[in-house]
């Protein structure tokens, strides 16, 4: 071939469209071009939906959905490796949840067996299914409702702690530390000591909710007035509000209690004691708890966005003010329900979310249900120990959780100080 012919052929090849070989014949759709066979990606390679890979960034939906080996010379895309990592992470999360449910089943069975009169697991199961009449009343009519209530109280506390920590963007926030439990206790004290024209089953959770919500908003307002929502500010505001509420609660107990019996009832309740409702009250309590849990799951994405900061969350289209208000309402509702049924139970709302972050990560879609499950395990086991360690008496539930949660809180503070 002449030199001129070679030049014409080279110029034609240079001006050919991408995917056209030097011969000038187009490559059939679906085949691999020369550049793809040598390791380069070809925009002509077919991908699902007919989309083009040209200009697609790694990690995009078009790039990650492309079939392995297409336009890469047989080598998989990075998206395939990411998909494998996500699949392994999902499998691990399912295994963790399955293990947590197994631990909860063991703790629940232990709660059915523990007490002044111990029962074997076989006796407990037979009593639940209507056999073994000698202990059926003890287990089915008394221990089972109390174990269910303890599990619900723990789930509500773990849920409340996860929501408050997401709203405040602070891993040390929890219902007791931010004053929400103290506000609920003040409301419950008024419900127990004052005569009301309506049933106490309505007054107790209503006043507890009002007190918890007011305390949470007060702590948030004090922190915002100082111009910061960091750990120290929130802790100082929470401690100050809790101290004020404790003094107010003591004053109400001194002035409103008509006899020693009512004062003793309030004191026992304030130190933490599971009060299993019966009949309609149990149904209402469980339905409200399920409603708060379901609504909290809807807050998972807003809480994830708030973790990026208020400015970034607003840039992603989140109404920050509405999300914070809704989160405070849900966290306060959970704390109020827990306080109305279990009294003052400290540190469960702090420990459960931290266990969840360690095992399932920080995404609230997984963190919220796991925190509820971890809280249910903690309170169910602690309540079983509280009524079985010193028979025939009972140790207040709040004392056990404080003994276990106090050192846990100090370890968290020490870890944060070493990190900074």
Image (cartoon, helix red, strand yellow):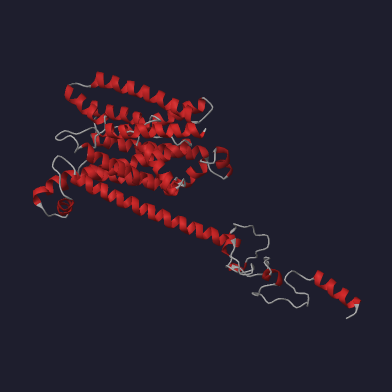
| Residue at image point 67% right, 71% down | 37
Q: Residue furthest bottom?
A: 1
Image location of residue 46, percent across then percent down: 63, 70
Q: Quadrant of residue 240?
A: top left
Picture coordinates of residue 403 (x, y %)?
30, 32
- Left or right: 44, with 251 as reference point: right
Residue plotted at (44% across, 39% down): 327
Residue 106 in view of the camera: yes
Q: Position of residue 118 (x, y in %)?
A: 15, 44
Q: Position of residue 296 (x, y in %)?
A: 40, 44
Position of 411 with respect to 342 (left or right) is right
| Image position of 2 with respect to 270: above or below | below
> In this view of the protein, which residue sits in the foreground, 156 or 43?
43
Residue 209 visible? The answer is no
Q: Residue at x 28, y 44 (%)?
A: 151
Image vertical order of residue 8 relative to residue 148, above or below: below
Q: Is residue 402 left or right of residue 46?
A: left
Question: Which one is nearer the viewer's eye here, 30 or 70?
Answer: 70
| Quarter containing the N terminus | bottom right
């Amino acid at each position: 071939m002449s030199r001129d012919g070679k030049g014409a052929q080279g110029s034609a090849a240079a001006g050919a469209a991408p995917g056209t070989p030097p011969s000038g014949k187009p490559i059939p759709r679906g085949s691999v071009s020369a550049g793809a066979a040598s390791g380069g990606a070809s925009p002509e390679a077919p991908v699902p939906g007919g989309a083009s890979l040209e200009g697609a960034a790694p990690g995009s939906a078009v790039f990650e959905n492309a079939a392995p080996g297409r336009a890469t010379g047989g080598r998989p895309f990075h998206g395939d490796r990411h998909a494998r990592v996500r699949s392994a992470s999902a499998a691990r999360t399912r295994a963790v949840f399955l293990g947590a449910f197994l631990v909860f089943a063991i703790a629940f069975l232990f709660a059915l067996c523990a007490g002044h009169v111990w029962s074997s697991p076989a006796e407990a199961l037979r009593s639940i299914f209507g056999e073994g009449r000698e202990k059926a009343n003890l287990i089915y009519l008394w221990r089972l409702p109390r174990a269910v209530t303890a599990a619900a109280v723990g789930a509500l506390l773990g849920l409340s702690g996860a929501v408050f920590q997401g709203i405040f963007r602070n891993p040390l926030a929890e219902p007791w530390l931010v004053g929400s439990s103290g506000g609920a206790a003040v409301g419950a004290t008024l419900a127990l000591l004052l005569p009301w024209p309506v049933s106490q089953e309505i007054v107790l959770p209503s006043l507890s909710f009002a007190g918890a919500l007011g305390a949470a908003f007060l702590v948030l307002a004090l922190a915002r007035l100082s111009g910061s929502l960091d750990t120290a500010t929130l802790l100082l505001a929470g401690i100050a509000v809790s101290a004020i509420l404790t003094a107010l609660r003591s004053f109400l107990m001194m002035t409103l209690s008509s006899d020693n019996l009512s004062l003793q009832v309030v004191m026992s309740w304030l130190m933490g004691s599971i009060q299993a409702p019966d009949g309609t009250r149990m149904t209402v309590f469980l339905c409200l708890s399920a409603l708060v849990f379901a609504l909290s799951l809807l807050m998972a994405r807003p809480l994830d966005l708030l973790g990026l900061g208020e400015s970034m969350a607003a840039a992603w289209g989140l109404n920050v003010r509405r999300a914070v208000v809704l989160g405070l309402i849900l966290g306060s509702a959970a704390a109020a329900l827990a306080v109305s049924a279990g009294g003052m139970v400290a540190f469960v709302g702090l420990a459960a979310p931290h266990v969840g972050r360690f095992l399932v990560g920080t995404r609230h879609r997984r963190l919220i249900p796991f925190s509820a499950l971890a809280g249910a395990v903690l309170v169910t086991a602690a309540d079983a120990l509280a009524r079985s360690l010193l028979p025939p008496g009972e140790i207040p539930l709040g004392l056990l959780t404080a003994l276990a949660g106090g050192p846990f809180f100090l370890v968290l503070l020490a870890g944060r100080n070493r990190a900074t």
